[in-house]
Amino acid sequence: MQPDEELFTRQLPTDRFREQTDPVLQLEKINVNFDGFQALTDLSLQIGVGELRCVIGPNGAGKTTLMDVITGKTRPQSGRALYDQSVDLTTLDPIAIARQGIGRKFQKPTVFEALTVLENLELAMKGDKSVWASEQADRISEPLRLLRLEGERHRPAGLLSHGQKQFLEIGMLLVQEPHLLLLDEPAAGMTDAETEYTAELFRTLAGQHSLMVVEHDMGFVETIADHVTVLHQGRVLAEGSLREVQANEQVIEVYLGR
Ligand code: ADP
Ligand code: MG
């Protein structure tokens, strides 16, 4: 797979978004404790509108727990998670949070294998009653094109490659038109070409969406990241440009230098 050069050049985020500083998400001193085990400690983090943020860190650092807090799967013992500068997500349930425009992709693809690509996308849109039938086709055609699944639309999802299933799941998020996308290790199990295309795709989506991406593949992070947050033992160890965090002694010690 080769990225569609023309498409990506045209849709790259504009400077207006790059410089926009309004936060879409403000985590303030989040603490999560599982039966005495402190998974997140006083974790504070801000993501700007249209930003593409990478979160990295060793296994067990709390990256998935962080996404669980944002999506309401885990309720923190203390702290706030302000969305769009108004709603505290820690007071909402997962369905209400999804309705606010927050979409999440889990590590393992969870598409319906017996249904076709198209049916999967239609199903993903079902929850949204505000969509008119005539609008449905429009909403689906763009993600299909972006994810290069146009030719596969009538294939059962079970027959797709692993990477294509990952793309389909991203498509199932996109048809819901989320403002904030959370992606947990999206490139896991992908071929090099698929990983490369995913990186291009995320750069396309940034600007129109805000993205939080957890990923271990440093090559991938290097390609996409404006801004990187390093987690370690439930705390923010470092934050900045990739170059800045790569030069951070503590980061080298606990994560990069292994
Ligand atoms: P990461 O995604 O960075 O690898 P996780 O957020 O999955 O890390 O886990 C952080 C820590 O919290 C780990 O030590 C993990 O074992 C623990 N943990 C995560 N979820 C639970 C849970 N539901 N109950 C108990 N411990 C948990
Ligand atoms: Mg994880």
Image: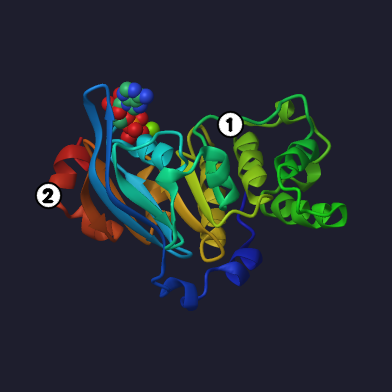
Whether residue 197 is visible here, answered yes or no, is yes
Of all residues, the one furthest to the front in this rendering is: 91
Of all residues, the one furthest to the right in this rendering is: 134
Q: Is mark 1 within 8 Å of ligand 2?
A: no
Residue 98 percent location from the top left of the image: 57, 45
Screen quadrant of the C terminus: top left
Residue 59 percent location from the top left of the image: 30, 31
**Which residue corresponds to the image point at 70% horizontal and 48% vertical from the top-left?**
148
Asked if the residues shown at circle 1 and circle 2 are in contact, with their CB atoms under 8 angstroms apart, the answer is no
**Which residue corresponds to the image point at 26% horizontal and 21% vertical from the top-left?**
35
Q: Nearer the viewer, residue 7 or 23?
A: 23
Which mark, residue 249? 2
For the residue labelled by badge 1, is the local secondary structure a helix, a strand or a loop? loop
Residue 40 percent location from the top left of the image: 26, 38
Number of numbered callouts drawn: 2
For the residue labelled by badge 2, is the local secondary structure a helix, a strand or a loop? helix
Q: Which numbered disc flags the more N-terminal residue, 1 or 2?
A: 1
Residue 255 percent location from the top left of the image: 22, 39
Which residue is the site of mark 1?
A: 109
Q: Nearer the viewer, residue 112 or 135?
A: 135
Q: Which kind of residue does numbered mark 2 sit on?
A: Glu
Q: Which kind of residue does numbered mark 1 sit on?
A: Pro
